[in-house]
Image: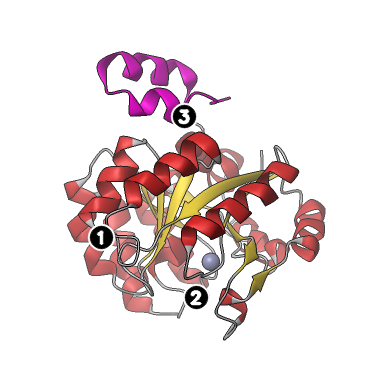
Amino acid sequence: MLIDGHCHAGQGDQLTAPWNTDAPLESYLRRARRAGIVRTVVFPAFHTDYATANRELARIVAERQPQLVGFAMVNAKSDAGRVREMLQEAVMRLKLRGVKVHGHEALPTREVCEAVRAFRLPMLVDVAGKAHVIDMFAPQYPDVNFIIAHLGSFADDWRAHERVIEQLVRYPNVYADTSGVRRFDYLVQAVRRAGAKKLIFGSDGPWLHPGLELHKIKLLGLPAQEEALILGGNASRLIFPRAVGVRHRRRNTGSVMQFARHDVR
Ligand SMILES: [Zn+2]
């Protein structure tokens, strides 16, 4: 199943750039369909109030089931003190399945990591070039799966790509998405060194074309099995953990997770 692991949906409220104004899905969905993408992970555009943005996102996701999978967004700084409460709503009421944090606003804090762990969610982090912070949070939370957006930098920071590739090798719980990576050889290097099991195809739609981003993965010329991991296998494993494993875990842990994964398919 072809999954796009990085796309935005809904409206932002700051109106100073595309990424904080609007992420309309009409063109994206047409392009994704043509490219053969059957599932897309979406999260809000930049917003000053993620409680509101997450609710809007959930409405958009609910209208397009099962095509869209929603991730909640939190701002580790402005939402400090209420992250767990926000994720509780996101998981239980809004049926969102992961969390996105953007370094332009605030990098993941202990509060965010603790909450994400409690609900057993994957966390997509845009470190905005600050790859060194991965060396802080990844070993502190070995049971949280972190997906590093844009292989560490949307802004073509090759030093960040190099460091993230090395972190993919070192940390079993660190993955990266391929969206918006311009220098193709860093994708080649990432697969060669870390293996296809550590990369997740993402488009950064609706602003980047999913067909174009998908073509980059095809151009890697990987064996079918490895390509399939990048194009959906890895995302599927992180976002939809096996119900069997969940049942086993439920017996040994607190009450939060019983709700967190009750609708796993
Ligand atoms: Zn993005």
Residue 250 lies within the magenta run: yes
Q: Secondary structure at mark 2?
A: loop
Q: Which residues are magenta?
A: 241-265
Q: Is mark 2 within 8 Å of ligand 1?
A: no
Q: Position of residue 233 (x, y in %)?
A: 54, 38
Q: Tell me the chief SS of the magenta region.
A: helix
Residue 17 lies within the magenta run: no
Q: Quadrant of residue 117?
A: top left
Mark 3 = which residue? Answer: 241
Residue 173: tell me if it is visible: no
Report whether 157 appears left or right of 115: right
Residue 131: tell me if it is visible: yes
Amino acid on which the number 1 mark rests in the picture: Ile
- Tell me the distance, in whole angstroms, between the alpha carbons under discs 2 and 3: 32 Å
- Tell me the distance, in whole angstroms, between the alpha carbons under discs 3 and 1: 23 Å
Query: If you read the primary sequence from the N terminus, does the residue marked by circle 2 or circle 3 appear first?
Result: 2
Q: Position of residue 30 (x, y in %)?
A: 82, 58
Amino acid on which the number 3 mark rests in the picture: Pro
Q: Residue at x 48, y 65 (%)?
A: 49
Q: Which mark is residue 134?
A: 1
Query: If you read the primary sequence from the N terminus, does the residue marked by circle 3 or circle 1 appear first?
Result: 1
Q: Are marks 3 and 1 in contact (CB under 8 Å)?
A: no
Report whether 221 appears left or right of 187: right
Q: How dense is the environment of label 3, judged by Cα within 10 Å: few (below 14), some, or many (20 and up)?
A: some
Front-most of 122 and 176?
122
Q: Are marks 1 and 2 in contact (CB under 8 Å)?
A: no
